Amino acid sequence: MPRRVRTVTSINGRRVSETGARISVFDNALLYAEGLFETFLAIDDHIVFLDEHLDRLFKGASVIDLRIPVTRRTLARWMKATVTAHPDRVKKLRLTITSGEASRWVGVQGKPQVILSASPHELPSDPFRLEVSDWKVDQDSIFRRIKTISYAIHAAALKQARQSGYDDALLINEKNEVAEVTSANIFWVKKGRIYTPPLSAGCLEGITRERVLKEARKVRLRIVEKSERLAAMLKAEEVFISSSLKLVIGVSEIKVSNKRYHFPPGETTALLIERLNKSITS
């Protein structure tokens, strides 16, 4: 039986082996967490929401003054080649752009490294169980609007949740309002209305989040972007999350300290799962 391909990786447009996928230990991405990333879903070699992800990438580059070393067209071509080289039908594509090997402290821009890696992916089908994290996000930071590689809070919260037997962690902001899940945006349903934190709450401007809002409006579902405390959100009838690698998936349980709140499958969640799946395959 042939060995399943784990990853297909390229650096600066050149395919490399797993053992040959290396960058300098002096890259500022490693020294100062200076860089950007995007994660894409690819189905049948089609990269889902490609343009929207690249829009966010270039927006982030302008925020941190990072020079992306190739054109958008070249970047898309490299991405397509990396995805096509992986044999699986459904896969995850990770794009990382480092700031390069040079000291920004002396005002020198290094040569950024463009790293692409395609790997097998399975879209989740079972509802997620979330644990509320003690870590909090700064809702006022401009870096909450872009995807920098500085993800220490999210990584620590996710690790803690996984060690407790949960799928992911729910993050609160410094005003004690619901912000996001470490790897997704969050929504809840009350009395026929869909609620989600506004960007000002410190959640990422998710690509799939925006598509969920669009699909909900198409079927005349009422959307309310509202900052809300955890206690109020936990009174919801349904809870679901969205991300590029999950699309839409329900939430069945949220743990707060030692108390657990349960949420049954709901019609609104099911409808949006169906619509989003259809929109990316049609």
Image (cartoon, rainbow, N blue to C red):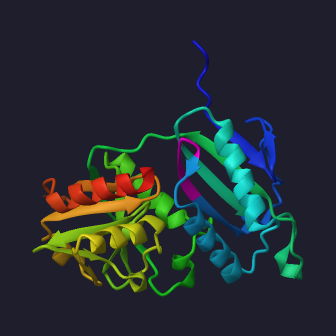
Q: Is residue 42 magenta?
A: yes
Task: Tell me the residue at 80%/50% (across/down).
Answer: 13
Q: How many marks?
A: 0
Prevailing secondary structure of the magenta residues? strand
Task: Tell me the residue at 40%/54% (across/down).
Answer: 160
Residue toward you, 185 or 213: 213
* Residue 64: % across, % down: 69, 80
* Residue 209: % across, % down: 40, 69
* Residue 34: % across, % down: 71, 70
Residue 141 visible in the current orientation: yes
Residue toward you, 193 or 179: 193
In the depicted structure, whether residue 38 falls above or below residue 167: below
Res 208 quadrant in image: bottom left
In the depicted structure, whether residue 124 falls above or below residue 185: above
Q: Is residue 164 left or right of residue 188?
A: right
Residue 171 visible in the current orientation: no
Location of the N terminus by quadrant is top right
Q: Is residue 149 left or right of residue 200?
A: right
- What is the span of residues highlighted in magenta in the rendered image? 39-45
Task: Tell me the residue at 21%/74% (across/down).
Answer: 221
Toward the top, the furthest residue is 1
* Residue 272: % across, % down: 27, 60
Q: Is residue 221 left or right of residue 152?
A: left
Q: Is residue 162 magenta?
A: no
Task: Tell me the residue at 47%/59% (across/down).
Answer: 156
Q: Is residue 196 left or right of residue 32?
A: left
Toward the front, the furthest residue is 282
